[in-house]
Image (tube, rainbow, N blue to C red):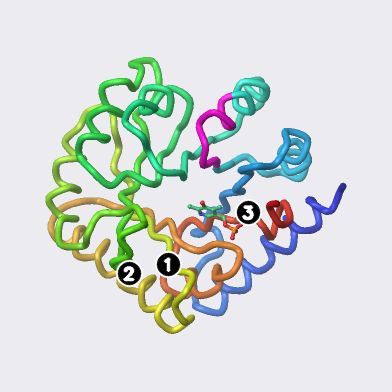
Amino acid sequence: MNEIPNRLASVRERIRQAATESGRDPAEVALLAVSKTKPIADIEAAIAAGQQRFGENYLQEAVPKITALAGTPLEWHFIGRIQGNKSADISRHFAWVHGLDNYRHAELLDRHRADDLAPLQVCLQVNLSAQSSKGGTDPENLQALAESVSALPRLCLRGLMTLPDPDTSPTVQRSDFARLRDLRDTLNDKGLTLDTLSMGTSADLEMAIAEGSTLVRIGTDIFGPRS
Ligand SMILES: *Cc1c(COP(=O)(O)O)cnc(C)c1O
């Protein structure tokens, strides 16, 4: 400790450069700091450096952090795999969920979203590499899922999310980012109003921003490697 403020500043600079180079306004690209496996002290260091949006993958790990920091105005994003039996707690504790990929989970999140909270902001995860081990809906099922999710009153469908297959080349990964953008545009042409493309991590944020990302999810390059 504590390199977090410097690392955060350099990630912000990379975002600014990548956006500028592709003719985009850097303000269109939100930074989600992915704090999974990292202690509360690291999150506090990022908060002190002006970060307010945090992403976590594991409910059991996240809830104590969210509770401990409840006095600070933060925006918590759940970016892990959703399990049906955890959906009530996910819906209670988070402002956003990025990994939604089926209607059963959508209904559970909707049913458990408290009336005194804003609707849960959701992104549908799309599996573009046909890797069976990964989450995400097939592109063929996306439109039907998007339409049914957008009808749920306690959810607000904001956009799409993807995680490229780490074993493919940068060229393939970049084309996956471009495909996600095309899928979003196609849904919007059909009457949906999706403003979010959740794509890009430490290794590939520049490519993701060049292909239209509006939210990059950065862990390692802010908090250091995870053991
Ligand atoms: C861990 C994780 C990230 C952050 O990845 P880094 O390579 O550490 O930046 C982003 N998105 C998801 C879904 C993750 O699980």
Specify the segment rendered in magenta: 56-63
The amino acid type, in three-letter code, at marker 1 is: Pro
In contact (CB < 8 Å): disc 2 and disc 1: yes
Q: Which residue is mark 3?
A: 219
Q: Is residue 8 magenta?
A: no
Tell me which corner region of the image, top left, top right, bottom left or bottom right, holds residue 9.
Answer: bottom right
Tell whether 66 sits left or right of 49.
Answer: left
Residue projecting furthest to the right: 1
The residues tagged by marks 2 and 3 sit, at their Cα atoms, a distance apart of: 22 Å
Pointer 1 local density, CA inside 10 Å: few below 14, some 14–19, many at least 20: many
Q: Which residue is mark 1?
A: 164
User: Residue sitting at 50 percent across and 78 percent down?
Assistant: 22
Callout 3 amino acid: Gly
Task: Tell me the chief SS of the magenta region.
Answer: helix
Q: Earlier in the sequence, mark 1 or mark 3?
A: 1
Judge whether 184 appears above or below 102 on screen. Answer: below
| Residue 5: % across, % down | 79, 51
**Ligand 1 within 8 Å, label 1 CB:** no
Assess mark 3: CB under 8 A from ligand 1? yes
Q: In the rendered view, does 184 fall on the left or right side of 225?
A: left
Residue at 50% x, 63% y is 200
Q: Residue at x 46, y 45 (%)?
A: 79
Taking the spot 39% from the left edge, 70% from the top edge, the residue there is: 177
Q: Splitting the image into four quadrants, where does ligand 1 fall?
A: bottom right
What kind of element bears circle 3? loop
Task: Name the residue that disc number 2 marks.
Answer: 129
| Side of 199 relative to 47 (left or right) | left
Left or right, 104 with respect to 196, comes to left
User: Dot 2: what SS?
Assistant: loop
In the image, which is nearer the foreground, mark 2 or mark 3? 2
